[in-house]
Image (spheres, rainbow, N blue to C red):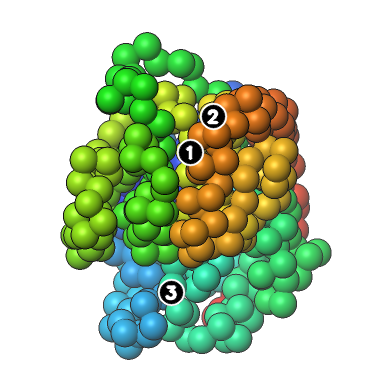
Amino acid sequence: MKILFVLHDGDLGGATTPVLETIDALAGKDFSFAALVPQPGSVSAALTQRGVPWKALPLPLWTSTKGRRRFRNIWDSWKAIPAVVNAVRAIAPDLVLSNSATIGLGSMAAAHLGIRHVWWLQEFVWEDHQLAFDFGWKLTGWLMDQRSVLALVPSKAIADKWAPYIGPHKQVRIDYHIKDQPRFAEAPAFNPAGAFHLVLAGSLNPQKGQMDAIDAMGRLHTRNVHLHLFGTGGRGYAARLRARAETLGLNEQVHFHGHVEGVAARLRKANAILITSRCEGLGRITIEAMRSGVPIVATDAGGIPELIENGRKGILYPPGDAAALAEAIEHLIASPQYAAGLGAAARQWASQHYGAEQFAQAIEAALRRAEATDTAPRTR
């Protein structure tokens, strides 16, 4: 079976990594793969390493921030359709898989050519990224249902979000394969020694809640706490984060590391890990944090509560509540044995639920089910 992945991003991230995990999981079986990417990047480099052919094409999103690019997106997508159709025709896949709800061109080309199409729905779209569909929710949801034989979802929260448009009979739950990273000896220890070090990893984006973490730092009763931010993002938001830290007198305690390799190794060096997102469909970083064995403080939002049982595998707090976040951090500082127990319980649970074997079995079964499903009629 030949699978064509259509990706919305050319760089590796939480939504694109499962594509590589799928390719690795199905290696040696009767599958072959190809990919369309919007631009060359770390994804295409990883595909090349695996011997997977890829092609870079303009792949405009069919979402925009509060509709500001709505008509431009529609026009750009219309212009891109012939090139995408020709690329899909040349690849001649058995199945087209759009690796995000935010891009519709793969489904359009698949419908035009009478090829089965699958969505991998990894986001809420509005709640987690503040994106709106250019054609509106109702029409887009109807189109997504009509142009799919199956939808893969990572959590009950995502499944419930999309159920009004893509019914449960088409949805298949796929738990990610989160590798248990080795304890890299080269990961540097955090300075200063003896301080309580918090790690927050993810793109610098208001929806990721880094501002809440800085505000919580300003509420702590002790100054022997350091916050380490890993990730890059819009310079405007990054500048606001730095300004907020300066206003609170935290310049020496809030550290901006930018993009680094081996974030998992740095998670293990922390005293606690923060997940401050306003909403996550599931959050791969949450699972990676749980696998680290380090205690976690996370928002009670989206799919996160499906992973973290409050008080047993971590501490949950309402998104945006800096006071509650500060209280949770101080609880971990004051109760090291309790904190260690949270980390150990999270690691044990995540290691059992997010391994290679169950992922390989689930993704193979889903793809074979999609292949066996009747195709939607051609658009013309």
Residue 254 vs residue 152, the one in the foreground: 254
Whole-angstrom CA distance, mark 3 to mark 1, is: 27 Å
The structure residue drawn at horizontal position 37% and vertical position 85%, both measured from the top left corner, is 67
Instruction: Kindly identify the amino acid type of the residue bearing the numbered disc 1.
Output: Ile
Q: Is residue 328 shown left or right of residue 216? A: right
Percent position of residue 352, x then y: 72, 28
Query: In the image, what residue type sits under mark 2?
Result: Val
| Residue that appears at 28% across and 34% down | 260
**Precedes in sequence: disc 3 or disc 1:** 3
The C terminus lies in which quarter of the figure? bottom right
Q: In the figure, residue 300 lies in which quadrant?
A: bottom right
Give the quarter of the image for residue 195.
Answer: top left
**Which residue is identified by label 2?**
294
The mark lying in front, picked from 2 and 3, is: 2
Q: CA distance from mark 2 to mark 3?
A: 33 Å
Label 1 element class: strand
Residue in front for this viewpoint, 33 or 41: 41
**Residue 66 rendering spot, x and y as whole percentages:** 39, 83
Q: Residue at x 53, y 50 (%)?
A: 327
Q: Are the residues flagged by discs 2 and 1 in contact, CB closer than 8 Å?
A: yes
- Residue at point 43% right, 74% down? 131
Could you tell me the amino acid type at mark 3? Leu
Give residue 351's position: percent from left, percent from top.
Answer: 66, 27
